[in-house]
Image (spheres, rainbow, N blue to C red):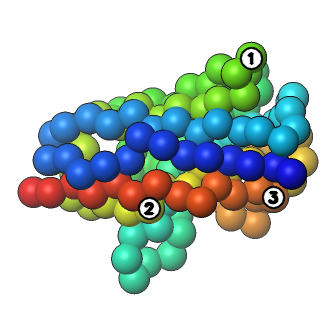
């Protein structure tokens, strides 16, 4: 059974940093991209960042220059370093893996596996 488990969320102040992790288990995802989405209260889930197996990355405009996505393929783990956090970054952050390999994730429709989410709250 595939499991994606996020960790690292919490309550921080504006300008602070957080590092999220996503550990995949149950199968290996060789060749698959991994990504992060987020959902704020009352809003649609939105794309945040993604990284392909080989390291190519993709970011939402709202986080470019502040967030950095990375992965350790040997550990089946992905990370999201979030710097200069803003109150508008407050959301539940979800780890995601697409249905098929070798595509750069940017939309929910591509996703085949979701984590349970981790809450990030940024106070002003």
On screen, 15 above or below 88? above
Seen at 69% across and 58% down, the residue is 114
Residue with the most extreme left position: 124
Q: Position of residue 96 (x, y in %)?
A: 67, 51
Q: Are marks 2 and 3 in contact (CB under 8 Å)?
A: no
Q: x, y (%) of residue 1? A: 86, 51
Residue 40 place in picture, x, y as percent? 39, 70
Q: Which secondary structure, mark 2?
A: strand
Q: Return the residue nearer the eye: 63 or 10.
A: 10
Return the disc, 2 or 3, that comes first in the chain's sequence: 2
Residue 6 image position (x, y, % from top left): 55, 46
For residue 92, the mark is: 2
Q: Which residue is mark 3?
A: 112
Q: Dot 1: few (<14), some (14–19), or many (≥20) neighbours within 10 Å?
A: few
Mark drawn on residue 74: 1
Which secondary structure, mark 1? helix
Q: Is residue 35 above or below residue 123?
A: above
Q: Is residue 96 left or right of residue 109?
A: left
**Residue at 9%, 57% in the rendered image:** 124
Is 17 in front, or is 8? Answer: 8
Q: Nearer the viewer, residue 34 or 11?
A: 11
């Amino acid at each position: 059974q595939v499991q994606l488990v996020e960790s690292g969320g919490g309550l921080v102040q504006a300008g602070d940093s957080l590092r999220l992790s996503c550990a995949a288990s149950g199968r290996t995802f060789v060749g698959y991209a991994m990504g992060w989405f987020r959902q704020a209260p009352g809003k649609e889930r939105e794309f945040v960042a993604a990284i392909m197996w080989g390291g190519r990355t993709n970011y939402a405009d709202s986080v470019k220059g502040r967030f950095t996505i990375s992965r350790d393929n040997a550990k089946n783990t992905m990370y999201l370093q979030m710097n200069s956090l803003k109150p508008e970054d407050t959301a539940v952050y979800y780890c995601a893996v697409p249905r098929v390999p070798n595509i750069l994730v940017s939309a929910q429709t591509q996703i085949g596996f979701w984590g349970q989410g981790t809450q990030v709250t940024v106070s002003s």
